[in-house]
Image (spheres, grey):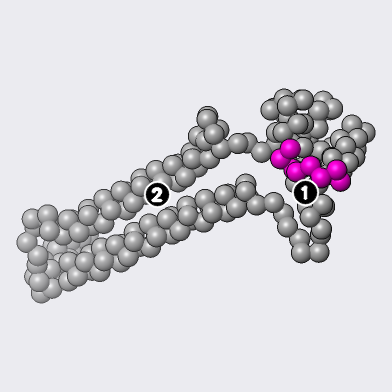
Amino acid sequence: MKTQKFLHSALSNKVVIRNFVRFILIFVAFSFMITGHTQTAAPKDVEVPAFASDLEELLTTVYCYCGCTRETIKACVCNTALGIEAAFKDELTKGKSVEEIRTAYLAQYGSEFYAVMPAEGINLLAYIMPGVILVLIGGVAFVVLLRSTQSMQGSPATSEAPEKSESEVSDAAVKQVEAELERYKRGN
């Protein structure tokens, strides 16, 4: 009877492990897709003209050089940020592309004012490590669950005590109760 109970729990644990691994894989895949989309896609509105979306991209991808706080030009509230925004508008109306304007700005003030971390060199490690950590955590959880199911499967098979039938157990219990009753009677 016990082996069937453990067999059932071992089978259900295999299903739990399989579902857990699937969940982790799907979670990792979606997190990479979402991260990649947010890093590469510029916010696009159907009603907003290309000029406004280009300006929005410029204002959100470079930091203001004013020095008050490390904010993007869109988030900064100083007069310097307003001047930079006006300069960006002028450059866009002259027909320059977003990349040309951004490259000129970063060449003048330095690459530390680029708000989007480029996926190259040591920065690539920052993009890869969350996925690696999730895979490692999932692997550790998988091994722990696998070992726990193996120990539950192995425990009934390794027990060397012979199983007793219900009548033998109840006879032994009856004899023990009678012995306790006799000791109680002798004590009083």
Q: Please check the rendered image and state whether residue 84 is part of the magenta-colored stretch, yes or no.
A: no
The magenta stretch is 93-100
* Nearer-the-camera pick, 120 or 178: 120
* Nearer-the-camera pick, 20 or 132: 132
Q: Residue 175: in sight, yes or no?
A: no
Residue situated furthest front in the rendering? 95
* Image position of 129 (left or right of 35): left
Helix, strand or loop at mark 2: helix
Helix, strand or loop at mark 1: helix
Q: Considering the image in quadrants, where does the C terminus appear?
A: bottom left
x%, y% of residue 65?
Answer: 81, 28
- Mark before the other along the chain sequence, 1 or 2: 1
Identify residue for label 1. Answer: 54
The mark lying in front, picked from 1 and 2, is: 1
x%, y% of residue 169?
Answer: 12, 68
Which label belongs to residue 138? Answer: 2
Residue appearing at x 47%, y 52% in the figure: 28
Q: Residue 87: in sight, yes or no?
A: yes
